[in-house]
Image (cartoon, rainbow, N blue to C red):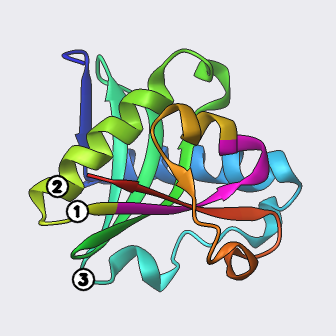
Amino acid sequence: MTDYELVSPTDASSWRSYHDIRRDALFEARGRGDVYDENHPHEHVPGNHPKLLLCRGDPVGVIRIDVASPRALLRRVAIRADVQRSGHGRVLLSLAERFAAEHGCRQLESHVASDAVGFYQKCGFVIDRNKVASSGPGSVLMRKGI
């Protein structure tokens, strides 16, 4: 993992990478590119931490970690389409877990797209069967203890 950094976007270039990856992987790939809002106010709420995953300085993934200790909610997790299935997602979740633990969290939660459940299970997450119905259409609430 020495090739990786999980950083906060701080300048126009890093914010552009953050939004481009999110828009492409999470909205346009699902036919919803027209609804993506770069200026959504949740990006700047205290306790919400937009993060960009760099591999040897190259932006490859994004996540927003919403800290509400003792839990952290992982939001809008995405890897750039051209580098998916290369191990970046596992690294991203691992670094997000470390970040959450450093901020006093003992549990991770994420509303996971149904086609990503297997990946999250391989990363140690379990389906929260008590809240499946409240996860929203097409998503499953998953948890992992830290």
**Residue linked to disc 3:** 46
Q: Quadrant of the N terminus?
A: top left
Q: Residue at x 69, y 42 (%)?
A: 116
Q: Position of residue 71 (x, y in %)?
A: 30, 71
Which residue is labeled 2 in the image?
Answer: 101
Measure how far apart labels 2 and 1 are at the Cα level: 6 Å
Judged from the image, the secondary structure of the residue bearing numbered disc 1 is loop
Which quarter of the figure has residue 43?
bottom left
Closer mark to the observer between disc 3 and disc 2: 2
The percent position of residue 131, horizontal first and vertical second, equals 63, 77
Q: Secondary structure at mark 2?
A: helix
Q: What residue is at 49 percent from the left and 19 percent from the top?
A: 87
Q: Amino acid at mark 2?
A: Ala
Task: Identify the residue at image location x=59%, y=32%.
Answer: 80
Residue drawn at x 22%, y 57% as measured from the top left: 100
Give the dominant element type of the magenta stretch: helix, strand or loop: strand
Is disc 2 surrounded by few (<14), some (14 to 19) or many (20+) residues within 10 Å?
A: some
Compare marks 2 and 1 and give the one earlier in the sequence: 2
**Residue 118 in the image, given as x and y percentages of width and height:** 67, 36
